[in-house]
Amino acid sequence: MNFATVIGTVVSTVKVPAWRGYRLLVLQPTDDDGTNSGRPLVAVDLVSAAPGQRVFYVRGREAATALPNPENPADAAIVGIVDEARRTSREEKKS
Amino acid sequence: MFTARVVGDVVATIKHRDLQGEKLLLVQPVSAEGEARGKPVIAVDRAQAGPGDWVLVADEGNSAAQVLRKPRGAVRTVIVGIVDEVDRDVKKGFA
């Protein structure tokens, strides 16, 4: 799972039946400290996230299986809203 | 699977049902020598890992489902073990 910030909404009336009732949001992937990294993508919103919120999302097959009906073409899904991401230690070379 | 260093934790009140009650840790993928590779990701901890631990992370939905003993869902990244040592000495036969 990776961090992202919600930067927009996609309006789609005609879509796959399994996605009915779900919103599609535009995500800007970020690092754990919130700085942008990489290109924006569209994800199915499963946690009622709002624009500007920091979220985390899952990519690949698990995005589809995260929905109640796993037979859908999602390749990214928002699965949580970040309250806090804390660094508890610096990654260091094992001695 | 890949090895990673636990560098932090993530607090999320609102999250997918499959993540309820799970400890979420921030893991920095590392090489066999212990050097950071790429950016940190969020993983479900099922190995009682702590800050600074060198861990083994499975990043695939079916593996996650087996470890969590649940049908396939929203989880794909799970800490499945704590690394004691990685031996890369070809002469000893661990190529």
Image (spheres, coloured by chain):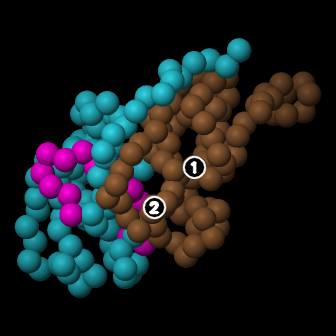
Residue B46 in the image: above or below residue B92:
below
**Quarter assignment of residue B90:** top right
Residue position marked by numbered label 2 in the rendering: B19
Residue type at the position of mark 2: Leu
The chain coloured cyan in the image: A
Residue type at the position of mark 1: Asp
Residue position marked by numbered label 1 in the rendering: B45
Going 62% across and 53% down the picture, which residue do you hit? Answer: B46
- Queried whether the magenta region covers residue B67, the answer comes back as no
Are callouts 2 and 1 both on one chain? Answer: yes
Residue A11 visible somewhere in the drawing: yes
Q: Where is residue B71 in the image (x, y as percent from the top left)?
A: 55, 76
Q: Give the range drawn in magenta.
A: A48-65
Q: How far apart are marks 2 and 1 (CA)?
A: 11 Å
Look at the numbered discs 2 and 1 and tell me whether their residues touch, using CB distance below 8 Å: no
Residue B5 visible somewhere in the drawing: no
Q: Is mark 1 on a helix, strand or loop?
A: strand
Q: Chain B is drawn in which colour?
A: brown
Q: Position of residue B32 (x, y in %)?
A: 67, 28
Q: Mark 2 lies on which chain?
A: B
Going 37% across and 64% down the picture, which residue do you hit? Answer: B16
Q: Which chain carries label 1?
A: B
Q: Position of residue A7 (x, y in %)?
A: 13, 47
